[in-house]
Image (tube, rainbow, N blue to C red):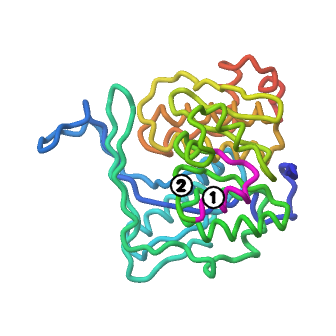
């Protein structure tokens, strides 16, 4: 897999392209998850942009890289809100497809106050999946790293194939197995999978064995994320458990999205596997300190400062001033 050198100008249009799902999130914190047919007052409420690839793109923008989001929304108020939320973070939105006369994606998210764990109710509404013919090959191959969440699997598969041909590393945020997910995984350089996906993909119930089994073909990176238990990642030599960093958790919504965005950023920087996973874990932990998927996302200096305090890895001290 080719390692990208960070900071070169004029060679590509974007450092990272994130392809996939965007949504408008309504988030509410409750004292505890309610019983059926009861009423409960929200302790806190927020309306934000959400979605795996879209939030990953905001993560990358906060870290200081040039990033574009490629996806599809409707031509309603939700769609306009999503585009505006991305644009104000510095994410390029010129390649978002707007479907006429379609209601956009949205989600209701209920967060338990004491645990920070969330339950998501979501709808694609009237927006059709992004189609292969709606992709611009020149845009897709104008980046140094491609990240997809696999929601629009056929479009994601085609984009991954183009990236493979151009020598661009592909990161796959693999949450659940969908149509063409297996084919997409085969065109992936970094498979960062949920425990569920890893189990269904490999047949292994043990996350460490699943991570090892996912190292095949062109793939150089495999990670199984475990929520509050951190993650496990595999190399050809060993399997390593990366614990989650302990923080005061407000909301876990978007933690995985932040992890994936930070992972793509680490590949962009050419960091070692250990540094990429540790950095991604730190970014995900910091995200959890605020309500919603985006308010807690750190800047690069914020993430590095956190790691200098929490990690015994001398690499983060060496990063001072770089």
Q: Secondary structure at mark 2?
A: loop
Q: Nearer the viewer, residue 246 or 300?
A: 246
Q: Residue 14: image x %, image y %?
A: 75, 62
| Dot 1 alpha-carbon crowd within 10 angstroms: few under 14, some 14 to 19, many 20 or more | some
Residue 185: say if magenta.
yes
Q: Residue 124: image x %, image y %?
A: 40, 65
| Dot 2 alpha-carbon crowd within 10 angstroms: few under 14, some 14 to 19, many 20 or more | some
Label 2 sits on residue: 177
For the point 62% across and 38% down, the residue is 224
In the displayed structure, does residue 165 sit left or right of residue 212? right
- Image quadrant assignment for residue 313: top right
Hey, which residue is sitting farthest front in the picture?
203
Residue 275: say if magenta.
no
Q: Nearer the viewer, residue 25 or 152?
A: 152
Please identify the quadrant where the C terminus is shown: top right
Q: Residue 284: image x %, image y %?
A: 57, 36
For the point 67% across and 44% down, the residue is 63
For the point 81% across and 30% down, the residue is 319
Are dots 1 and 2 in contact, CB under 8 Å? Answer: yes
Label 1 sits on residue: 182
Q: Residue 223: image x %, image y %?
A: 67, 39
Q: Which residues are magenta?
A: 180-192
Determine the CA span between mark 1 and mark 2.
8 Å
- Image quadrant assignment for residue 274: top right
């Amino acid at each position: 897999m080719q390692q990208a050198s960070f900071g070169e100008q004029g060679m590509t249009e974007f450092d990272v392209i994130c392809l996939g799902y965007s949504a408008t999130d309504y988030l509410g914190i409750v004292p505890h998850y309610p019983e059926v047919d009861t009423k409960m007052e929200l302790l806190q409420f927020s309306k934000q942009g959400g979605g795996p690839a879209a939030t990953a793109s905001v993560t990358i923008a906060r870290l200081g890289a040039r990033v574009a989001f490629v996806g599809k929304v409707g031509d309603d108020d939700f769609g306009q809100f999503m585009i505006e939320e991305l644009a104000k973070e510095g994410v390029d939105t010129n390649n978002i497809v707007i479907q006429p006369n379609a209601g956009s994606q949205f989600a209701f998210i209920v967060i338990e106050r004491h645990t920070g764990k969330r339950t998501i109710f979501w709808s694609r509404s009237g927006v059709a999946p992004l189609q292969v013919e709606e992709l611009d090959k020149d845009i897709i191959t104008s980046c140094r790293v491609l990240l997809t969440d696999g929601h629009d699997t056929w479009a994601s598969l085609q984009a991954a194939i183009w990236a493979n041909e151009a020598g661009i590393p592909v990161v796959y945020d693999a949450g659940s197995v969908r149509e063409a997910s297996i084919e997409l995984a085969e065109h992936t350089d970094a498979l960062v999978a949920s425990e569920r996906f890893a189990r269904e993909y490999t047949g292994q119930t043990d996350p460490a064995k699943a991570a090892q089994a996912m190292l095949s073909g062109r793939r150089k990176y495999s990670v199984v994320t475990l929520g509050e238990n951190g993650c496990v990642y595999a190399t050809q030599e060993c399997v390593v458990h990366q614990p989650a960093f302990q923080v005061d958790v407000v909301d876990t919504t978007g933690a995985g999205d932040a992890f994936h965005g930070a992972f793509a950023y680490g590949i962009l920087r050419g960091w070692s596997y250990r540094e990429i996973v540790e950095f991604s874990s730190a970014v995900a932990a910091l995200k959890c300190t605020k309500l919603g998927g985006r308010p807690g996302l750190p800047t690069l200096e914020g993430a590095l400062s956190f790691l200098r305090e929490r990690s015994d890895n001398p690499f983060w001290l060496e990063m001072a001033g770089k």
